[in-house]
Amino acid sequence: MKTDPHPLPASLRRQAVAGGVTGLVADAFLVLFYVVARPWADDPGDSWLGPANDVLVLLQYLALVPVVRGLGRLMAGDARARVWTRIGLVAAVLVVVLQALLLAGLMPFEYQVVPVSLSAVVWTMFPAWTLLVGLRR
């Protein structure tokens, strides 16, 4: 019988791929939004691409929350990995909550965009630390 060489369960690997693909599509929609709607212009156009990006970003981070937890469990013996897992979880959950508030019309974009952007930047440090810890093993 063949054993699975991956320490992360197949369901979490699928969620990681889904989160990554969703993020790529969200990024493409965001670029297209700026090209089509030109939100900086005096007379910006209307486009479905911005709201679609908002939904996809929520789905991306929602898919990645269990992945962060799963990777964190794999590196439970490393103190720095535990810290970065917590930071990654907080950042990902914050993006999910803020995106949900935006989509529900409970928080204006102007108040939401900076915390979401900062959380996304902080979240990217989690995979970087995960990679470094994994390379040391």
Image (cartoon, rainbow, N blue to C red):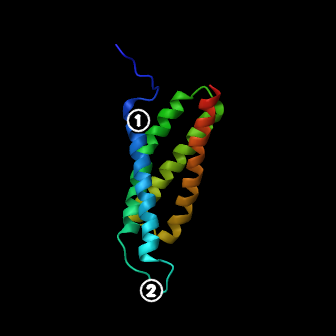
> Residue 133's image quarter?
top right
The quarter of the picture where residue 105 lies is: bottom left
The answer to whether one can see residue 45 in this image is: yes
Q: Is residue 27 above or below residue 91?
A: below
Q: Nearer the viewer, residue 36 or 16?
A: 36
Q: Residue at x 45, y 44 (%)?
A: 64
On the image, the x and y values in percent for residue 24 come to 44, 54
Q: Which residue is mark 2?
A: 43
Q: Earlier in the sequence, mark 2 or mark 1?
A: 1
Rendered image quadrant of residue 52: bottom left
**Which residue does the image show at 41% across and 74% down from the upper left?**
36
For the C terminus, the quadrant is: top right
**Image position, residue 130 (x, y; %):** 58, 36
Q: Amino acid at mark 1?
A: Leu
Residue 57 location (% of width, % of height): 43, 56
Residue, disc 1: 12
* Residue 62 in sight from this viewpoint: no
Label 2 Cα neighbours within 10 Å, binned few <14 / some 14-19 / many ≥20: few
User: On the rendered structure, is 135 left or right of 103?
Assistant: right
Where 20 falls versus 136 (above or below)? below
- Count of numbered labels shown in the rendering: 2
Q: Amino acid at mark 2?
A: Asp
